[in-house]
Image: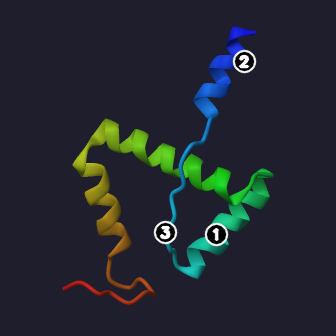
Amino acid sequence: MQNVKIRDKMSAKDTRLTFRVRSELKKKLELAAESESRSVAQICEAFLQAGLVAYEKEGAKYISRFLALRDAPGRDRPRGRT
């Protein structure tokens, strides 16, 4: 019975996180969710958690590498930075 209480505490969600994404990213998340028989929220939370684990392991190198790939020339999204 105590294991159930621990699991309930660990999975309790007590706040919201709201942000905007490109429609292309949303479609990809919806496809991933459908493929995994999960909700988009569950998929987003899993990806966020995986990203944080990688960031905690690699530090600033992880996010710098990710952002460099995202902002690489040839991507079909407007680049607002110079």
Tag 1 secondary structure: helix
Give the class, few, some or many, for how many residues have Cα within 10 Å of label 2's Cα (few <14, many ≥20).
Answer: few
Circle nearer the N terminus (1, 3): 3
Whether tag 2 and tag 3 are in contact, CB under 8 A, the answer is: no
> What amino acid type is highlighted by mark number 3?
Phe
Which quarter of the rendered picture does the C terminus lie within? bottom left
Q: Indicate left or right for 49 with 24 as reference.
A: left
Residue sitting at the far front? 14
Give residue 50's position: percent from left, percent from top: 49, 44
Towards the viewer: 51 or 21: 21
Q: Examine the rendered structure and indicate whether residue 67 appears above or below residue 56.
A: below
Position of the N terminus by quadrant: top right
Give the residue at x 24% y 50%. 61
Tell me which amino acid carries mark 2: Val
Q: Is residue 63 left or right of residue 29?
A: left
**Within 10 angstroms of label 3, few (less than 14), some, or many (20 or more) residues?**
few
| View extreme (top): residue | 1
**Location of mark 3 (residue):** 19
Locate residue 78 relative to residue 25 in the image: left or right: left
Residue carrying label 1: 28
Label 2, secondary structure: give it.
helix
Q: Amino acid at mark 1?
A: Lys
Which residue is pictured at 35% across the width and 60% down the height? 66
Query: Which residue bears the numbered disc 2?
Result: 4
Q: Determine crowd level at label 1: few under 14, some 14-19, many 20+ residues with C-alpha closer than 10 A.
A: few
- Quarter of the image where one finds residue 71: bottom left
Decide: is 75 above or below 48: below
Whether tag 1 and tag 3 are in contact, CB under 8 A, the answer is no
Which residue is at 24% across, 84% downward? 81
- Work out whether mark 2 precedes mark 1 in sequence or the reverse, and give the earlier one: 2
- Residue 78 pos. (x, y %): 38, 90
Q: CA distance from mark 2 to mark 1?
A: 34 Å
